[in-house]
Amino acid sequence: MPDFDRDIDLQRRRWLQAAGMSLGFAAIAILPRVLRAAPVSRSRLILLGTAGGPTPKPARSAPASAIVVDGVIYVIDCGNGVARQMVKAGLDLGAIRNVFITHQHSDHNADYGNLLWLAWAAKLHTRVDTWGPPPLSEMTRLFLQMNDYDIRTRIADEGRPPLAPLIAPHEISQGGLVMQDERVKVTAALVQHPPVSPAFAYRFDCPDRSIVFSGDTRPSENLVKLARGADVLVHEVMYLPALDKLIASEPNAARLREHLLASHTTTEQVGRIATEAGVRTLVLNHFVPGGDPSLTDEVWHDAVAPHFKGRLIVGRDLMEI
């Protein structure tokens, strides 16, 4: 083959190779993209305090829990010591954005104001919305008034922002949608905890699962409806065989016994409620009695297990689920 023809043939092969590569890249470019779903945010559930009743207990802290989604904290109930329990759990007090009170009993609201005050003394500088039964707004106002001297001192001395504008209380008196943001949807249901009324259970529908908190209640059909099909039900529990021992030293034993039986849920009832609601996981919480060392985890578990065949967890302080 003459040199000229060889050169033309070589150029033709090179051009075809180049064109083929270009066509290949073009083909790749027009292939449909495989869209990957965005990762679902994982919710964290932390039991901060699992005791029931207003008196301090040596082995369990006062009622409080937290849900964390994308680093944002939702606090449920504010028993005594909740701020310290959050620090022990490694939670950032400055990341609190919502606080929910189930009912106005001292073991659930004793540190409502203190939590926000102490978080502000740490690094809270973003608005916190608080939700709960009346008189939540008046409680907030009076707490700020009571601590006005310290608040004004720290504003002037430490350069902190005013605390009052950071707390936005919202009173609720009926069940239904409470709030919804880009992370969670919160729904409330009225439950029965005489003589305290209103009292609420809360359901948190998170990106990855649903979590229901019973609050303090006797068996409640409203709670069963609220918890229907939930992934996790955190429910208060009372162990009847230990009731007499609990109230033996109380001067008003008869009235206390009457109250406990009328306003709380026994181990058997808790199991049946979780079964009826069809929840996947039942977490025992707010133990009554909560200060009896003879009531081991096995005792609580064995008292509930015959009535619920799903996953059963005996809650402990600082447990993450």
Image (cartoon, rainbow, N blue to C red):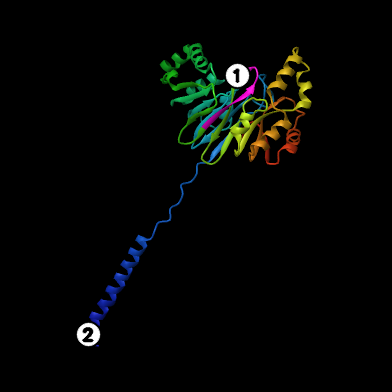
Task: Identify residue for label 1.
Answer: 197
Q: Nearer the viewer, mark 2 or mark 1?
A: 1
Q: Which of 265 and 152 lies nearest the eye of the viewer?
A: 265
Q: Which of 10 and 108 lies nearest the eye of the viewer?
A: 108
Residue 224 left/right relative to 177: right
Q: Is residue 270 above or below residue 18?
A: above
Can residue 320 be seen here? The reply is no
Do tag 2 and tag 1 residues touch (Cβ < 8 Å)? no
| Residue at figure coordinates x 35%, y 60% from the top left | 30
Residue 210 left/right relative to 181: right
Q: Secondary structure at mark 2?
A: helix
Task: Identify residue for label 2.
Answer: 3
Segment tinted magenta in the rendering: 186-195
Q: Amino acid at mark 1?
A: Ser
Instruction: Where is residue 108? Give x, y as percent.
Output: 60, 22
Q: Residue furthest left?
A: 4
Residue 198 left/right relative to 255: left
Residue 195 left/right relative to 66: right
| Residue at figure coordinates x 70%, y 41% from the top left | 309
Q: Secondary structure at mark 1?
A: strand
**Magenta-drawn stretch, dominant element (helix, strand or loop):** strand
Residues packed near mark 1 inside 10 Å, few (<14), some (14 to 19) or many (20 plus): some
Instruction: Where is residue 148? Give x, y as percent.
Output: 47, 12
Q: Which of 176 and 56 lies nearest the eye of the viewer?
A: 176
Q: How many numbered marks, from 0 up?
A: 2
CA gap, disc 2 and disc 1:
102 Å
Image quadrant occupied by the C terminus: top right
Residues packed near mark 2 inside 10 Å, few (<14), some (14 to 19) or many (20 plus): few
Tell me, for residue 24, which label it has, or none.
none
Image quadrant occupied by the N terminus: bottom left
Instruction: Where is residue 293? Give x, y as percent.
Output: 75, 27
Can residue 242 be seen here? The reply is yes
